Amino acid sequence: MSELLPTSTAGSLPKPSWLAEPEKLWSPWKLEGGALTEAKQDALRVSLSEQQSAGIDIVSDGEQTRQHFVTTFIEHLSGVDFEKRETVRIRDRYDASVPTVVGAVSREEPVFVADAKFLRQQTDSPIKWALPGPMTMIDTLYDAHYKSREKLAWEFATILNQEAKELEAAGVDIIQFDEPAFNVFFEEVNDWGIAALERAVEGLRCETAVHICYGYGIKANTDWKKTLGSEWRQYEETFPAIQASNIDMVSLECHNSHVPLDLIELIRGKKVMVGAIDVASNIIEQPEEVAATLRKALQFVDVDKLYPCTNCGMAPLSREVARGKLRALSAGAEIVRRELTASRVAA
Ligand SMILES: [Zn+2]
């Protein structure tokens, strides 16, 4: 692994067309039963090899075994009825038909632990595993049981902690919680959102991360971004409390966004996964553009704490575009690594 500026992705990568319909979220599986299990593992191997050949340092499963980053986890829990659906507004942005919480939620068995063990067997590189964050989970459900967002988030945090501990035991090096909802519900984030996240990481010895972005490059998100004005200062609302929390790393959207990078100063001391790849565009970045984003971020992140990354997951992109973007990320990080090494030698 590169000691300086180790690269990784925010999480999801495109699925092969023989596994699920490509360039789509919530795409149905094309196989079932034992054939599906085998195909998911094959896709995981392909995804891993794509990351390795692109030179990505911290690898993931590319979320090949999940249909969606939130719903697949919830599907494995009891207390949620997927047949009983209600329409809710997701992240205050778009309506979706979602399952209903009908009773006490619990995890009857591990959700991703077997997949994480499988990935661990395939590589000696550090691995990162993404789980949905408690606040983002409750935002994707209709709650007819607890009738309290905070209470339900706390229950999910307890469940996530059980899963995270088993992922750690399976050899996962970094456990990341995806919390795009942190960019929307600021008051709740500060009231109980970060506390719920800290409950989810309680007792873990591996590294922990929170991913906060402006969403996948789907229309509902790109339309919302157009309403945010010329400066996106959402991170300013939550960073002070995140800085004070015991989460080790923060994964952010930077490249091509309107986030003023000086906001990163607010989490000084944390490791920062700087999004240097735009996932809402099919244009493959030039390595020099990636390098420019990383150089700017270096003004606000200590060099040993900067982790070049993508803005968000790349599941909705074509495999060819995603492959190009992974290579650009590696090449851009390498440019900055060389500059840093040269300046160290000179000094
Ligand atoms: Zn994201």
Image (spheres, rainbow, N blue to C red):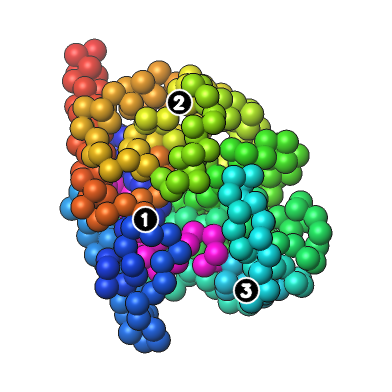
Q: Which residue bears the numbered disc 1?
A: 315
Label 1 Cα crowd, 10 Å radius (few <14 / some 14-19 / many 20+):
many
Q: Secondary structure at mark 3?
A: strand
Q: Which residue occupies 43% across, 59% down?
A: 25
**In the displayed structure, does residue 64 sit left or right of residue 204?**
left
CA neighbours of label 2 inside 10 A, class few (<14), some (14 to 19), many (20+):
some
Label located before the other in sequence (1 or 3): 3
**What residue appears at the point 32 percent right and 40 percent down from the top-left corner?**
281
Residue lying at 58% horizontally and 49% vertically, measured from the top left: 94
Residue 328 visible here: yes
SS at badge 2? loop
Which numbered disc, 1 or 2, marks the residue that appears first in the sequence?
Answer: 2
Q: Looking at the image, which is closer to me, 2 or 265?
A: 265
| Label ID, residue 258 | 2
Name which residue type carries label 3.
Phe
Residue 138, percent from left and from top: 67, 56
Residue type for callout 2: His
Q: Report which residue position mark 3 lands on.
A: 82
Figure check: 325 above or below 296: below
What residue type is disc 1 on?
Ala
1 and 3 marks in contact (CB < 8 Å): no
Q: Residue furthest top?
A: 347
Q: Look at the image and tell me in which quarter the N terminus lies.
A: top left
Q: In whole angstroms, how far apart are the C-alphas of marks 1 and 3?
A: 23 Å
The stretch of residues the image draws in magenta is: 56-73
Q: Answer above or below: position of 110 versus 127.
A: below
| x and y percentages locating residue 13 in the rendered image | 34, 56
Proximity of marks 2 and 3: CB atoms separated by less than 8 Å: no
Residue 216 horizontal/vertical position (percent): 44, 47
Q: Residues within 10 Å of mark 3 (few under 14, many from 20)?
A: some
Give me the residue at 54% from left, 60% from top: 70
**What is the C-alpha distance between the residues marked 1 and 2?**
23 Å
